[in-house]
Amino acid sequence: MESILDKVVQSHTLCEKEILYLLETKDTKKLFSAADEIRKKYSGDEVHLRALIEFSNYCKQNCLYCGLRRDNSHVTRYRVEPQDIIESARKAKNYGYKTIVLQSGEDSYYTVERMAKIISGIKDFDFVVTLSIGEKTFEEYKAYRDAGADRYLLRIETTDETLYNKLNPGMSLKNRMLCIENIKKLGYEVGSGIIAGLPGQTLESIAKDIVYLKSIPVDMAGIGPFIYHPDTPIENIKGDFFELSLKIITILRLLMPDINIPATTAMDTLNKEGRLIALQSGANVIMPSITETVYRKYYEIYPGKVCLGATPADCRYCTENKIKSINRRISTGKGFHIRQSGL
């Protein structure tokens, strides 16, 4: 452990075998502490807040692990109209947010023209705009970029091709990787990541996932634990996916010390202090929801999401108080990834 940590702290490189060792280790205290020190050195004590609007839970895809999957007939579907999305962003300005994250299922209702209108309308308020709306063509990604979108989040989920194709029927890992390549070519800040604990996933494949994320290299890495949804056909497997997610976060921080890493809401579902623990293990971003309360319970990728009855104001000030409780502070900047020399 000591020799591997010394190596990665100095060089920010590890081979797959060394990554696997860290994924398997029981000595997590040293690992988490090392990542927190690197976070502090490169990112400081600021936490970037990014306001999340979940504007549609319609999805044409049928991923076996997702509660929004096309064939789930138990979901109450909803869409937020473009002018209402823009109005939500306007309100977010009053809460001090600098970034809006637009997230949805893959919903064809939101044509290029509609998305361009939404993006440009939000940019009028001097926001950074992040999109998380799935697989698109190069031309669509370009149109969003031309309209003002700054960042794009597209999780790879897993780089195990057999597992990916099994869990995502009708999709392909090769196309997913092509989408990420296109996003990078167009000058977006690139966000990607994986789900920790997917049925059929191995620690060996996670080590390969980590190597892939570094090879892109991503500007933001989003890691979320697998949480079983009863309205999906996937196997309900058991495991400590909270700790596994923390290990992945810490390894990514050690390998890519200057990137942005969110403490995801799913961490709070598995541990009531989950996001705070993630912030103390290498993470430096939180995405409070500003989705209108009436819609929140219907954006159920996984069950047990926290704060379903909270208002956007509640989430903003609750998040701020939690961040202060661990002696961290909210960033006043826009949180772009500034790649540091030598990394």
Image (spheres, rainbow, N blue to C red):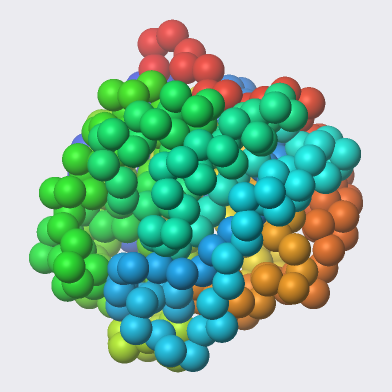
Asked whether residue 84 is in view, the answer is: yes
- 198 or 180, nearer to the observer: 180
In percent of the image, x 66 and y 35: which residue is there?
122
Please state, as top left, top right, bottom left or bottom right, where the C terminus lies in the image.
Answer: top left
Drawn side of residue 290 relative to residue 18, left or right = right
- 215 or 171, nearer to the observer: 171
Furthest-front residue in this view = 113
Q: How many marks?
A: 0
Please state, as top left, top right, bottom left or bottom right, where the N terminus lies in the image.
Answer: top left
In percent of the image, x 87 and y 55: which residue is there?
313
- 25 or 315, nearer to the observer: 315
Residue 2 rendering spot, x and y as whole percentages: 41, 39
In percent of the image, x 34 and y 24: which residue is there?
186
**Quadrant of the rendered structure where residue 63 is?**
bottom left
Residue 208 rendering spot, x and y as whole percentages: 21, 48
Drawn side of residue 201 relative to residue 276, left or right = left
In percent of the image, x 75 and y 63: which residue is there?
292
- 10 or 270, nearer to the observer: 270
Q: In the rendered view, would you say 222 is above or below 294?
A: above
Residue 126 rendering spot, x and y as whole percentages: 71, 25
